[in-house]
Image (cartoon, rainbow, N blue to C red):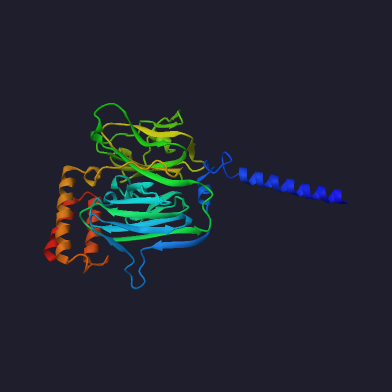
């Protein structure tokens, strides 16, 4: 009887060990937390109670904050362990370049340098300041007028997390609304990986002939690359995507066959497309002319591209186009901190000579309106100046600079 009981106990223990081995091997690609089998695994690395930090006010409907020109605001500062699962934000800002003028930075686990640094619009996939509506598994830019910015990247942390928004315009961000949803856990995430994102740009003036590589990410040490958002401005028309995507993973080169192929389309796409993992977005109905602003994205989620020592991501590109990119990746801290990027004057969205002249006049007139109207004491996000901002923004988006200036001059006189 004792022998039979001992045999039964041993059989149960062996079966339990096999089951544990089966389930643990199914959670990673190499048996350790440094190489996740999917981005979902990173999201599931910490579980706890649901919390939200937002711009809501206890009374009334003033559910926003304001950021004066040149100032920074901490919008999220939480200690302990958890994972951010959703980051939503929208802004009302008089500066026509506000998607580039506002900057987002994120810090994990007490690090002094940000693991995320990018112009606000570019971070959410609105490259070049061009807000084109789309929806994907990880990000979305949604109505009204493509000002609803959404991120669903999982962002785990073990000792705390902080998100900062900086306004590099001379004009205030009149209203910034935000929500950050996260789970607060009692123990540290099971993965050491932390979310990173970095911005780079390559203007048309950088070189004059031939194809040149634009390196959007140069990563070192161990990590996992999760994708990119591209902003492209083509002032002349003609297909701009003949260059290849080039991935160098620990010295092993994987080269593609063209930009449209990298995002899953083919043969010079003639229409916009927005999917779970990739998209091709045009700022007008004339996508087949390839003239104007385009936003593209590609996410590597199931699985991400993991590397042991280094990874470089590059694209071949024509000389006459402007390019920008935000790369997304995961690394243990301290990882590769995002590079510094140029001041606002050098990262302004490309505009015609008339557009640049109107931009400076617009900022001057807005400064006059704000001064006369008594910013910020007598302002709300829904007052006449708020309506003016929305109307001028729509005209700038359509490049109707003359009409925008007429509105502003009339408003300055009325004040």
Q: Which is nearer the eye, 26 or 132?
A: 26
Q: Is residue 272 in view?
A: no
Residue at x 29% of width, y 53% of height: 166
In this view, the residue farthest toward the right is: 1
Above or below, comparing residue 335 to residue 171 in the picture: above
Quadrant position of the C terminus in the picture: bottom left
Residue at x 33% of width, y 49% of height: 132
Spot occupied by residue 1 in the image (x, y as percentages of width and height): 88, 51
Above or below, comparing residue 236 to residue 395 in the picture: above
Spot occupied by residue 325 in the image (x, y as percentages of width and height): 34, 41
Asked whether, in this view, residue 341 is left or right of residue 26, the answer is: left
Spot occupied by residue 387 in the image (x, y as percentages of width and height): 24, 63
Q: Which is nearer the eye, 17 or 283?
A: 17
Residue at x 71% of width, y 48% of height: 16
Q: Which quadrant of the structure image shows residue 393?
A: bottom left
Above or below, comparing residue 283 to residue 259 in the picture: below
Spot occupied by residue 225 in the image (x, y as percentages of width and height): 45, 40
Q: Is residue 156 in view?
A: yes
Above or below, comparing residue 217 to residue 98 in the picture: above
């Amino acid at each position: 009887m004792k022998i039979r009981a001992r045999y039964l106990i041993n059989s149960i223990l062996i079966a339990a060990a096999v089951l544990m081995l089966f389930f643990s091997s199914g959670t990673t690609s190499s048996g350790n937390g440094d190489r996740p089998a999917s981005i979902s695994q990173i999201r599931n690395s910490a579980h706890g109670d649901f919390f939200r930090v937002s711009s809501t006010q206890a009374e009334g409907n003033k559910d926003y904050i304001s950021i004066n020109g040149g100032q920074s605001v901490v919008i999220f500062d939480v200690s302990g362990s958890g994972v951010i699962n959703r980051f939503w934000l929208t802004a009302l800002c008089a500066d026509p370049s506000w998607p580039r003028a506002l900057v987002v930075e994120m810090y994990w686990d007490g690090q002094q340098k940000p693991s995320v640094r990018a112009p606000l619009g570019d971070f959410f996939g609105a490259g070049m300041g061009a807000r084109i509506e789309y929806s994907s598994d990880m990000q979305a830019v949604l109505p009204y007028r493509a000002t609803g910015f959404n991120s669903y990247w999982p962002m785990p942390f073990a000792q705390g997390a902080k998100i900062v928004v900086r306004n590099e315009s001379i004009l205030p961000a009149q209203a910034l609304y935000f929500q950050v949803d996260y789970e607060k856990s009692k123990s540290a995430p099971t993965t050491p990986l932390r979310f990173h994102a970095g911005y780079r740009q390559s203007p048309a003036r950088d070189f004059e002939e031939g194809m040149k590589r634009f390196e959007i990410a140069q990563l070192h040490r161990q990590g996992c690359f999760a994708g990119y958002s591209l902003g492209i401005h083509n002032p002349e028309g003609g297909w701009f995507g003949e260059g290849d995507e080039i991935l160098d993973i620990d010295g092993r080169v994987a080269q593609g066959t063209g930009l449209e192929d990298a995002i899953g389309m083919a043969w010079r796409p003639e229409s916009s497309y927005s999917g779970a993992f990739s998209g091709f977005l045009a700022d007008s109905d004339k996508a087949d002319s390839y003239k104007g602003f385009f936003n593209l994205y590609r996410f590597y989620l199931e699985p991400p591209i993991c590397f042991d020592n280094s990874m470089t991501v590059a694209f071949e590109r024509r000389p006459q186009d402007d390019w920008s990119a935000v790369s997304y990746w995961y690394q243990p801290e301290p990882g590769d901190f995002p590079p510094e990027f140029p001041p606002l004057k050098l990262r302004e969205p490309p505009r015609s000579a008339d557009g640049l002249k109107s931009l400076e006049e617009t900022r001057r007139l807005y400064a006059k309106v704000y001064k006369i109207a008594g910013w910020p004491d007598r302002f709300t996000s829904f007052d006449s100046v708020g309506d003016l901002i929305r109307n001028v923004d729509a005209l700038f988006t359509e490049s109707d600079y003359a009409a925008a200036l007429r509105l502003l001059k009339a408003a300055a006189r009325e004040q």
